[in-house]
Amino acid sequence: MKDYYDTRAPEYDEWYLGVGRFASHERPGWRDAVEALERAVIALAPARTLDVACGTGFLTRHLRGPVTGLDQSDRMIEIAHGRMPSAEFVQADAIPLPFADDSFDRVFTGHFYGHLECTEREAFLAEARRVAPELIVVDSAVRPDHEREEVQERILNDGSAFAVYKRYFDGDELARELGGGTVLHASEWFVMVAAGALH
């Protein structure tokens, strides 16, 4: 997984933007769904936020308040920092998080939780709760053309192929899995759920 995302960094935003390999994909309503998700992130109250697995900062840039982005890929961090030069970025793994208890008001993560297998999920949730009272998870919505849990072959622009574990979510089910919470956004493509002491 680490090699996949580091290799994919220069082309990661093509997925959101619908260009490159994704230009020919049939994704009805995709552009509107991405814009609606961005608006939902912008609507979050300002907070000291840690964005775990921030990637290129595509969603990170819409978070209001002091933001720290964390990613294991230096190539992702480089792109994100170019996009948000005033934000702080840390290259590190998410488990364990390299921060003291209660360092933030919120942990935000986009399209990371759905790649975690069971024991990793439990460890990540414990770490997120340790460093902040609120957790917001953005991930992919349940799709008729995908199993809820599957291993996908993903091919990059250079032709390299990677096996990637992926889950798809119903908002209410994700809220329950996170220990209770609120569905902040749901579309045919994305869900965003808030959980923790503030919900």
Image: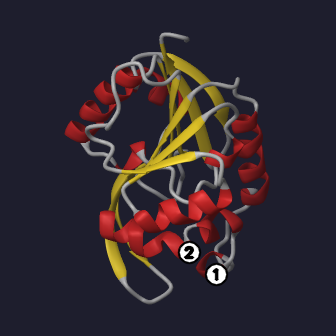
Above or below for 102 versus 169: above
Element type at mark 2: helix
Mark 1, Cα crowd under 10 Å, few <14 / some 14-19 / many 20+, is: some
Spot occupied by residue 119 in the image (x, y as percentages of width and height): 20, 38
- Residue under pointer 1: 20
Q: What kind of element bears circle 1? A: helix
Residue identified by numbered label 2? 11
Please, what is the three-letter code of the amino acid marked with disc 2?
A: Glu
The foreground one among 24 and 76 is: 76
Label 1 vs 2, first from the N-terminus: 2
Q: Is residue 92 left or right of residue 83?
A: left
In the image, what residue occupies the spot 63% across and 49% down?
A: 189
Q: Is residue 112 left or right of residue 171?
A: left
Report the residue at 41% width, 18% height from top: 102
Do we see residue 58 in this rendering? yes
Q: Residue furthest bottom?
A: 158
